[in-house]
């Protein structure tokens, strides 16, 4: 097998399709082979860190859970602080929370109240943009904390689920960068 030459080819070659997971009819995009390959993981980290630089971000937010895996090394590579946005009830101390709707019900995310302040420009990093619900809630949470949204960067956008269109108003002109669109 020949080695992929471009970032797109490299990333795609390290993402495995898993049929009928987590339920029949769904093709799950498994990024664990990408994470297990230090060269591919470094290339991904570099590409997302470059996005942080282009946006003028001063902090990186990672969305639970795989956004933590990607966001922390991106922040480190870009020389920025990393802020985890977690599911409700997972952070000790004072938090800000944001509820959002799911297909069947609702969920809530939180951030430590003191982690984001006025003057912060925040890049949200996650693995996949699907419907955009969690990302949209995180953008609202960032603004409620007094910070500015610098943008959203994801490894992969599932274009057929319409997340980008949903996020356009919430992004308010901030860029959305997807390294891959499927």
Image (tube, rainbow, N blue to C red):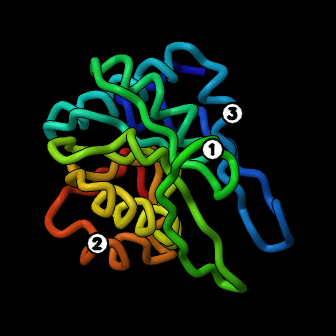
**Which residue does the image show at 24% across and 37% down from the upper left?**
51
| Image vertical order of residue 152 relative to residue 140, above or below | above
Element carrying mark 3: helix
Q: Is residue 151 left or right of residue 44?
A: left
Of pointers 3 and 1, the one earlier in the residue sequence = 3
In percent of width and height, residue 77 lies at 34, 17
Indicate the quadrant where residue 34 lies.
Answer: top right
| Image vertical order of residue 5 relative to residue 58, above or below | above
Q: Is residue 6 left or right of residue 90?
A: left
- Between 134 and 43, the one nearer to me in the picture: 134
Instruction: Residue under label 1, please give it.
Output: 91
- Which label lies toward us, 1 or 2? 1
- Between 38 and 79, the one nearer to me in the picture: 79
Extreme residue toward the bottom, this view: 104
**Which residue does the image show at 58% across and 81% down from the upper left?**
101
Instruction: Residue under label 2, please give it.
Output: 170
- Between 139 and 181, the one nearer to me in the picture: 139
Q: Are marks 2 and 3 in contact (CB under 8 Å)?
A: no
In percent of width and height, residue 7 lies at 37, 31
Instruction: Indicate which disc residue 32 carries.
Output: 3
In percent of width and height, residue 107 lies at 64, 71
| Image vertical order of residue 157 relative to residue 74, above or below | below
Indicate the quadrant where residue 46 lies.
Answer: top left
Q: Is residue 97 left or right of residue 36?
A: left
Q: Is residue 140 visible?
A: yes
């Amino acid at each position: 097998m020949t080695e992929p030459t471009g970032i797109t080819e490299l990333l795609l070659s390290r993402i495995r399709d898993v049929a009928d997971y987590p339920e029949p009819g769904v093709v799950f995009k498994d990024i664990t082979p990408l994470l297990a390959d230090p060269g591919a993981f470094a290339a991904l980290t570099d590409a997302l860190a470059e996005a942080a630089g282009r946006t003028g971000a001063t902090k990186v937010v990672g969305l639970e859970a795989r956004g933590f895996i990607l966001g922390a090394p991106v922040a480190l590579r870009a020389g920025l602080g990393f802020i985890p946005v977690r599911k409700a009830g997972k952070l000790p101390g004072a938090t800000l929370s944001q509820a959002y709707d799911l297909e069947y019900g609702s969920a809530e995310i939180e951030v430590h109240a003191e982690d984001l302040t006025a003057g912060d420009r925040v890049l949200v990093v996650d693995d996949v943009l699907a419907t955009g619900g969690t990302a949209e809630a995180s953008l609202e949470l960032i603004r409620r904390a007094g910070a500015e949204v610098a943008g959203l960067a994801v490894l992969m956008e599932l274009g057929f689920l319409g997340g980008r269109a949903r996020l356009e108003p919430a992004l308010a002109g901030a860029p959305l960068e997807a390294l891959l669109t499927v």
